[in-house]
């Protein structure tokens, strides 16, 4: 019994040490493919524009009847908490998964419902459905699929943390979130900015 307790104690300490050894989030390592899309103000936003900045990405659409409103509400909360922490040089990018419906004007109205600060939050559109499906699959390893006979688009619900080089480093639950979850994202952003 004493040997078992000792072995478990060692395993526990090793687990703690291995967790503490991660200074920066790195459970993902996906390179975001180059893009140039249009934001809610009709301005061009590209991957190149985001280089040198940490950014948070998600996939939403304005006609969504389920997960997108809470996701966008949680992203707005995260944006406010990042400001309270004084984080700078951080962008938020929400890719529309329904670009034929989500014009810049529609996206702006949607963002305003959640008090989005557009100074560092870009709601992107201006591409073909096939483009956003490919970007989601290739760069973020998630699904985006618009059924032929339905106006609801199937898509992933994660928030993705992207580093200054355009590499997806980790993801977080975008639907069930709390202030503690925001703290985790903020700490990960700080780690990447060191």
Image (spheres, rainbow, N blue to C red):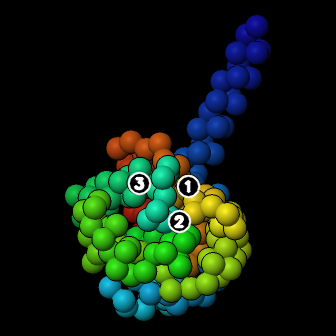
Q: State the residue in front, 72 or 194.
A: 72
Residue, far top:
1
Check disc 3 and report its element: helix, strand or loop. Answer: helix
Q: Which residue is mark 3?
A: 69
Looking at the rendered image, the disc whose residue lies closer to the viewer, 3 or 2, is 3
Look at the image and tell me whether residue 51 can be seen.
no
- Element under label 2? strand
The residue at the point 34 percent across, 67 percent down is 110
From mark 3 to mark 1, how far is it between C-alphas?
11 Å
Query: Which quadrant of the structure image shows residue 62?
Result: bottom left
Q: Earlier in the sequence, mark 3 or mark 1?
A: 3
Q: Quadrant of the C terminus?
A: bottom left
Q: Residue at x 39, y 81 (%)?
A: 104
Q: Is residue 96 left or right of residue 11?
A: left
Q: Which mark is residue 157?
A: 1
Q: Which disc number belongs to residue 59?
A: 2
| First in sequence: mark 1 vs mark 2 | 2
Is residue 44 something one can see in this rendering?
Answer: yes
Left or right of residue 76: residue 56: right
Q: Using the image, determine if residue 93 lies above or below residue 160.
A: below
- The reply to whether dot 1 and dot 2 touch (C-beta < 8 Å) is yes
Is residue 171 or residue 41 the one in the foreground? 41
């Amino acid at each position: 019994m004493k040997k078992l307790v000792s072995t478990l104690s060692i395993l526990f300490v090793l687990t703690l040490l291995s967790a503490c050894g991660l200074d920066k989030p790195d459970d993902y390592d996906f390179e975001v493919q180059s893009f140039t899309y249009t934001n809610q103000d009709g301005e061009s936003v590209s991957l190149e524009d985001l280089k040198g900045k940490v950014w948070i990405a998600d996939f939403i659409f304005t006609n969504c009847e389920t997960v997108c409103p809470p996701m966008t509400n949680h992203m707005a909360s995260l944006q406010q908490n990042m400001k309270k922490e004084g984080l700078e040089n951080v962008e938020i990018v929400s890719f529309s998964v329904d670009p034929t419906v989500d014009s810049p004007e529609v996206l702006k109205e949607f963002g305003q419902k959640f008090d989005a600060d557009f100074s560092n939050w870009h709601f992107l559109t201006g591409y073909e459905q096939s483009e956003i499906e490919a970007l989601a699959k290739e760069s973020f390893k998630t699904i985006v699929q618009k059924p032929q006979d339905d106006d609801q688009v199937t898509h992933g619900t994660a928030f993705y943390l992207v580093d200054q080089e355009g590499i997806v480093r980790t993801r977080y639950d975008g639907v069930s979130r709390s202030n503690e979850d925001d703290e985790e994202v903020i700490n990960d952003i700080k780690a990447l900015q060191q």
